[in-house]
């Protein structure tokens, strides 16, 4: 049984290599398009250090690759690598089309449910980020108005001390001496 799993993983790894060759993507580019921050998962799958997980196939199914690559082909090797768009539209309108297996249907439902929940989380995060942007913009406006007031005050104080002409001598500050200078010549 272990040998069977290794063979299955090798087949999937080979199909991923075919996808990369077809698209011209690198392993790292493939990982990024699947939403991985690091390419290690893809490297491990392709080098057969680990089997592709449910998460890997979920990410693939919602990536741009799923628009052109047949997920059934990736999983099983059956059919063509490229999705047949005309067949898709015929299946949607053909009452004689073979029914989707319960297993496939449950996988699709699970993927859609997870995608919907992920979208809800992302929408909530977007709302929080938009609110934070509004707060920062408000703080920035307050900061700009405070700095403008500081500039006006600085300009006023620098102008008032030098605005009396060159011959103007400022008053001598009072001395700290307690003796009176009255009557001195």
Image (tube, grey):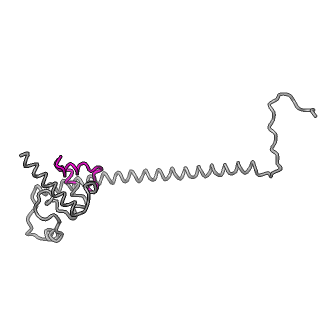
Residue 10: image location, x then y, percent: 13, 52
Q: Quadrant of residue 24?
A: bottom left
Residue 36 is covered by the magenta coloring: yes
Residue 33: image location, x then y, percent: 27, 57
Instruction: Name the residue: 10% across, 56% down.
Output: 102
Instruction: Name the residue: 75% across, 48% down.
Output: 161
Residue 56 is covered by the magenta coloring: yes
Q: Which residues are magenta?
A: 32-58
Position of 121 relative to 65 (above/below)? above
Q: Is residue 183 left or right of residue 54?
A: right
Position of 88 relative to 171 (above/below)? below
In the image as oriented, which residue stretches furthest toward the left? 1
Residue 83: image location, x then y, percent: 17, 66
Instruction: Name the residue: 63% across, 49% down.
Output: 150
Q: How many marks?
A: 0
In the image as oriented, which residue stretches furthest toward the top? 178
Taking depth in this image into account, of 176 and 119 the one nearest to the observer is 176
Q: Is residue 145 left or right of residue 55?
A: right
Taking depth in this image into account, of 179 and 41 the one nearest to the observer is 41
Taking depth in this image into account, of 172 and 37 the one nearest to the observer is 37
Instruction: Name the residue: 25% across, 48% down.
Output: 40
């Amino acid at each position: 049984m272990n040998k069977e799993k290794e063979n299955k993983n090798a087949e999937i790894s080979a199909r991923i290599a075919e996808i990369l060759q077809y698209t011209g993507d690198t392993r790292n580019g493939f990982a990024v398009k699947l939403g991985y921050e690091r390419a290690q998962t893809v490297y491990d799958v392709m080098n057969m250090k680990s089997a592709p997980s449910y998460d890997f196939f979920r990410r693939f199914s919602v990536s741009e690759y799923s628009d052109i690559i047949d997920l059934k082909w990736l999983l099983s090797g059956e059919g063509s690598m490229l999705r047949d768009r005309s067949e898709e539209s015929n299946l949607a309108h053909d009452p004689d089309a073979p029914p989707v297996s319960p297993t496939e249907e449950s996988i699709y439902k699970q993927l859609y449910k997870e995608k919907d929940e992920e979208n809800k989380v992302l929408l909530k995060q977007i709302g929080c980020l938009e609110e934070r942007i509004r707060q920062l913009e408000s703080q920035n406006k307050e900061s700009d108005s405070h700095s403008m007031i500081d500039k006006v005050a600085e300009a006023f104080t620098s102008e008032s001390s030098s605005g009396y002409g060159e011959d103007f001598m400022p008053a001598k500050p009072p001395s700290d001496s307690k003796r009176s200078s009255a009557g001195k010549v």
